[in-house]
Amino acid sequence: MSEWKVAPLKNCFAIGLRNGLTKPMRVRGSGVRMVNMKEIFAYDVIDDSTPMELVPVTEKEYEASVLMYNDLLFARQSLVESGAGKIAIYKGHSSAVFESHLIRCRIDKAIACADYIFYLFKSPVGKGTVSTIVQQTAAAGIRGSDLENLEFSFPPLHMQQAIAEVLSSLDDKIGLLVRQNSTMETLAQTYFRRWFEETPNEEWEEKGLDEIANFLNGLPLQNYPCKGGEPMNVIKIRELNSGYSDNSDICSSDVPEKYIVHLGDVIFSWSGSLVVDIWKYEEGALNQHLFKVTSDKYPKWFYYYWIKYHLPEFRIIAESKATTMGHIQRGHLSAAKVLVPSNDELKAMSETMQPLIEKIERNNAQILTLQKLRDTLLPKLISGEVRVKQ
């Protein structure tokens, strides 16, 4: 560790920190791609494939706010304290700028490794250090003048590059598996639409969605407070959308087994954002406002894609509710109709669909393993507890 030197972050800069552009909604729609707050919180790595809004920019604005490959972006503000200072790295090659609620940080590659700095701020060391400069007013926020003066213990450049290479190789493998899953998901939906939307058989039986699957509502898990022993993560709408986070709730592990969600279970939020997904994280306890969907008679792909098929109409129903959090009711599941092929036809369809679903689930299991390995290595590498051999 004698090679590691304590220095302020600004010692790594190629140019000074800068806030982005302010562009009102009325002018958006054409021009140059712009990274907004929503991209920062949705993605750790932002590249040319990341969906963004277009904004008109002058030559002067573009010159001041253009993003270059390996630029770092920090969230200047957040509704929650843990989001202030959230980091993302830009890996795009096409023209892009960034908005005013973000801070751009450009690293001098002769002094430091941008990927290493990225992982540093994703580590407990980086997050803990950022938390010391968060100011809470109407929203949590950080200032660039405070950010640039944060001090860290930096290894030599060659060690930064080696650490970043180990971590980024894991993220690259995760990204490859995620893209594979996206391709297979698209293919599976194509088959489903072809069978049930484009060329359905008029003789197929019509049933309600609740007739082909069981929809088990979750528990009010405040009834299972964690009083010691082994805690269990609570799965709420937030976790269904983005997985567990540092502020995910926990409950007692003595929740009845039928309410435990395992890797590969189909989960459907009937309230709020109305999302259906195949669970791809570690097991947890199902909170209310979520259904765990199972079937004793029909294959998983069948009821999963029929729920996805009806999601648009469910969302319209939920939005029409005069409540803070829109929702659907069990009667809406009965009203949502499903075409049921004969047993032989369903078996033939499953020969196509089941391998896709199983591959997605195997990939999800591998992604989870790689994420756990990365998250275990990250703090150890950043702190110097584990050293990378050259």
Image (spheres, grey):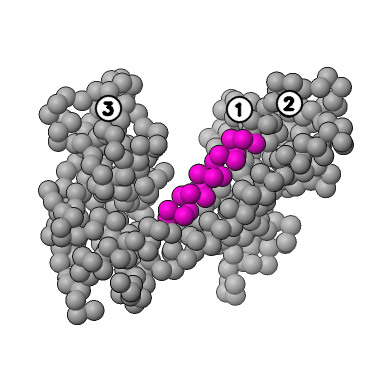
Q: Quadrant of residue 40?
A: top left
Asked if residue 88 is among those painted magenta in the image, a careful observer would answer no
Residue bearing mark 2 = 196
Q: Quarter of the image containing the N terminus?
A: bottom left
Q: Residue at x 47, y 66 (%)?
A: 373
The kind of residue tagged 2 is: Phe
Q: Nearer the viewer, mark 2 or mark 1?
A: 2
Residue 300 % position (x, y): 73, 44
Query: Neighbour class for label 1 at 10 Å: few (<14), some, many (≥20)?
Result: few
Figure check: 21 above or below 389: above
Earlier along the polypeptide chain: callout 1 or callout 3? Answer: 3
Q: Secondary structure at mark 2?
A: helix
Q: Secondary structure at mark 3?
A: strand
Mark 1 to mark 3 CA distance (whole Å): 31 Å
Tell me the kind of residue under disc 3.
Val
Q: Are marks 2 and 1 in contact (CB under 8 Å)?
A: no
Span highlighted in magenta in the image? 171-188
Q: x and y percent of residue 320 in the render?
A: 59, 25
Q: Which mark is residue 366?
A: none
- Of pointers 2 and 1, the one earlier in the residue sequence: 2
* Residue 144, placed above or below residue 229: above
The residue carrying pointer 3 sits among few (fewer than 14), some (14 to 19) or many (20 or more) residues within 10 Å by Cα, namely many
Which residue is labeled 1 in the image? 312
* Residue topped by disc 3: 32
- Quadrant of the frame with the C terminus: bottom left
